[in-house]
Amino acid sequence: YIRGVQSKNVAATLKHYALNSQETDRFLSESVVDERALRELYLMPFEIAVRESSPWAVMTAYNRFEGRNAGENKRLLDILRYEWKYDGCVVSDWGSVENRVLGLEAGMDLEMPGGSSPSTGELRKAYKQGRLDEELIDRALANIKKLEDRAGGAKRSSRLGHYRIAVDVARECMVLLKNDDDLLPLSPTESVLLAGAIDEAQIQGLGSSKVEPLVTNTPLRQWRDSQYPYLLEKPDHASVCLYFTSLPPDAEGYDRLSLELSLEDKVAIDCLKNAGHVIALIVQTGAPIALGDVRADAVLLMNYAGEGAYEALQSIIYGIHSPSGRLCATWTERRTDVASDPYFPSQDLQAQYRESIYVGYRYHATFGKSVAFPFGYGLTYGEFRYEKIDAELVSGNVFLTVRVTNTGQRKAKEVVQAYVSFPDSSLLRPFYELKAWAKVELEAQESRDVELKIPRDRLKTYTAQGERIIESGVYYFLSGPNARDLPLIASVELSDRRDGDRVIDVPEDLTVERLRERHLLFSGLEDSKNIPDIYKTMDRPVTLEEFEQLLGRKVPKPITPQGVHAPLYAIRGPLRSLFLKIALKRADSMPGDRDMNRHAVLSMPLRALARLSDGILSPGLLKLIVFLSLRGPYRVKKKRKSKGRKRV
């Protein structure tokens, strides 16, 4: 995607770097994570994108890490620049800058928004006082100029061409989760009852992801403009009800409080089922939901499918194309089935990643937890059989060849997935992790050998000594249609120096469950000296003391933001009502959940308001507001001068 975008002279911006897992109080929250999880989970996606695609811009996150704002965190930006050899422009998120001088020193080139930001005066003052090296200014300017030179000159293409691509992409992303009695696809002559959110275009999230589509459509308008028969009333005349539902749009600035469908939707679906209707539930959302006891005969997840969403949906519903999307997150039965649930979102301005490496399917697979729909899951209108897997070593990399046959009667696409397991690791690891995948289209009864490449570097693990190593031993490669259905196993013995690398036979009686039992017995024996026992069972929440043992240090006390860093809700005195009135008016004008929008705006620090005010809230006025309006712990306490004798 990055390479494709930039091939058209448009800059791709990778964001938010890094550890922006919590939206609640994101301007003020500090992320606390162990080194292993940091490197293997939260930095790895950025590293892969930087090394393989060279994005022209990287945007830093709002949150803090190790006491510094992400955009002013020298460690994070040194990893980006010097370990991964990034040569592009580093950009701040909107209003995220705390100290522009520190940001420049750390390696942040461009502040957004710029123009009349207070940072201009801060930089000028620091330069005149000799606190800012001219070389740092030159470096930032060079990176900004490089971005300007790279981007621009993109050719305009037809609106219709854009729309057709949007339809194709949307069709590839829709996920069929349930299809009792092969309810879908429908016959083009069947009358359907349209119900639920049929007058709303739920095609994108909010915040920075919200763009102006070239075409705006709704389910109702799509059916009105097409040849397919539909009903809005007299439901007894319809063979199937298409019920459209969604959660409040995903957005920046707040975390969802529930995974459940609305009570209104649940009651409506129950009423339709009690009246004897067959229901295909069409889910429009960008994140997992808990379906629980929702009584639907078929469930199709649209995701946020963009401007071509509803035309693409019709092509799936009526069988013109087979669904081929797969889940990129595990769907659990309930919120509490998620390993991080006890700790997120935090209410004390500190996001503690106590679950460590056990996130998503890594947690559920390792500890045998049941789920509603596993990672990588998705049905099609075809049927696929996984027949054979072979492994080969080429220049230290592992190549898998997976034989797949479409045993159904329709052309369809399958996503062949490969996971790696190293049950004898001396380090604590998840049972298996996804390492490669490929989507292939097969005619009915067609067989094909699908080749998957797993680079050797992707098999390395991060040690407590700060090294990435290949542990010597037997690695098992599991292949199948999703993270819970892996019928094929291949094995390769690897050594840290490559001299002992070889493909070996898999015992005939070896199963995935036996591998998991072996993993629980032997994985992490070396780590067990330093890592609490809870990380071998994860059968209860991790305590603070256990988390600190994993970290190898004390968790810092959550900060109380003071002065210009204090949130808007901390304002007291005569200015409180004025600021609240302005802030709440702004929040209420935003699309999405009203209460969540209000919380997001009120938790914004005063410094961010100043930087986003286009010069209206000057540094002097901000200081006056801070002096007049902050009380108690939010007020900056003056240091007392010592009355003792001077030490010579």
Image: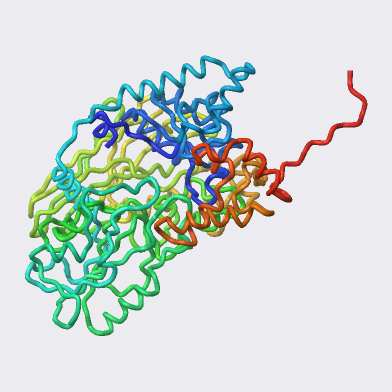
Q: Is residue 177 above or below residue 138?
A: below
In the drawing, does residue 465 fall left or right of residue 512? Answer: right
Q: Which residue does the image show at 91% across and 31% down from the upper left?
A: 643
> From where the camera sits, is residue 53 visible?
yes
Residue 60, image x, y percentages: 46, 36
Which of the image's four quarters has the N terminus?
top left
Q: Is residue 448 left or right of residue 589?
A: left
Foreground of the two, 150 or 278: 150
Q: Nearer the viewer, residue 308 or 122?
A: 122
Query: How many callouts does the rendering have?
Result: 0
Task: Depth check: give the residue in front, 265 or 596.
Answer: 596
The single residue placed furthest to the right in the displayed view is 645
Name the spot of residue 459 as percent of width and height, x first: 37, 35
475, above or below 247, in the image: above
> Which residue is nearer to you in this view: 422 or 563?
563
Quadrant containing the C terminus is top right
In this image, 343 relative to 505: left or right? Answer: right
Picture residue at 45% right of the left edge, 35% below the top: 112
User: Residue 260's spot in the image, x, y percent?
Assistant: 41, 67
Residue at image location 15% in from the left, 56% down from the top: 322
Residue lying furthest bottom: 275
Query: Where residue 527 sits: x, y (%)?
Result: 55, 41
- Judge whether 217 appears above or below 558 on screen: below
Residue 465 in view of the camera: no
Query: Which residue shows up at 36% across the image and 68% down it?
Result: 291
Give the answer, above or below, for where 394 lies relative to 270: above
Is residue 401 found left or right of 76 in the rendered image? left
